[in-house]
Amino acid sequence: MATAFQLAGVGAAILALMMFVIWLVSVRFQNAGIVDVGWSLGLVILSIWYAWQGSGFAPRRWIMVGMVTFWGLRLALHLVRRIASEPEDGRYQQLRRDWAGKNINLRFLFFFEFQALLDVFLSLPMLLAALNPAPELSLLEYAGVALWLVAVIGESVADAQLAAFKRNPANRGRVCQVGLWRYSRHPNYFFEWFIWVAWMVYGLASPWGWSSAICPALMLFLLFRVTGIPATEAQALRSRRDEYTRYRQTTSAFFPWFPKSQPSN
């Protein structure tokens, strides 16, 4: 019977190899945005691996696989469509400028492999659920599934609203402030984080489930301090400074809330 460390170790090796291949593709096409596709698919692969090799209650394992696979494939497809139709994401263009002349391809390789390691840490709720032997689902697990549904619907709506806004030629160079984007500057990031909250709640029913709280906490840190909000807003300020500055003054950065009145000059 595989232990948690054995399952995670083999999963890490699989993802390291996958990210190396994806890095080669990114070098060929000079588009590092594909790393985000690898990140989402990596969690799908880990969830399936854990469920396949895990010794826990089978319905619990495969319900988690269903949640992760639906989320991961939806996100990956969304990202692939964007990569195919748009230039490289501004965040990665900025990294290219910052790393120019500094072994840029090697730096991106380390960046890609870090995403594989990140997936292993963030897959903790999936690992715990796959090893939980309890013979029936608990109320916490039903609550986790319900919260996950809310999060997936919210993220899908936010993505659809932004896509519709961008499709309108009249909005070229404008800041999306419709629908959920009126109440949060990053509703897609908020609901993405809320998915991890849902998986944490699902994981709380398993032994050592409390440790899965590190996942939404880590996601929140990454979104606020690393590759999420800071990079996205820096790019928005470079391209739409005046309107985005006003948007920041009136609209919550993350948690949806009613907009403030425009400050007087």
Image: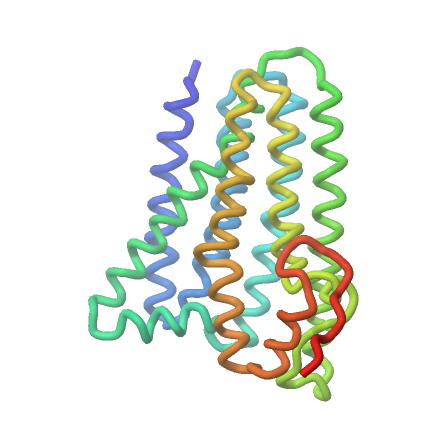
Whether residue 234 is situated above or below residue 183 in the rendered picture = below
* Image side of residue 91 versus residue 247, left or right: left
Whether residue 140 is situated above or below residue 230 in the rendered picture = above
Residue nearer the viewer, 142 or 251: 251
Q: Where is residue 33 in the image (x, y as percent from the top left)?
A: 45, 65
Residue 97 sits in quarter: bottom left
The residue under the point 31% across, 71% down is 98
The residue under the point 69% across, 74% down is 176
* Image side of residue 152 versus residue 47, left or right: right
Residue 258 sits in quarter: bottom right
The residue under the point 36% across, 54% down is 112
Whether residue 17 is situated above or below residue 188 in the rendered picture = above
Residue nearer the viewer, 95 or 44: 95
- The quarter of the picture where the N terminus appears is top left
The residue under the point 49% across, 36% down is 46
Furthest-left residue in this view: 102
- The quarter of the picture where the C terminus appears is bottom right
Q: Where is residue 201 in the image (x, y as percent from the top left)?
A: 65, 30
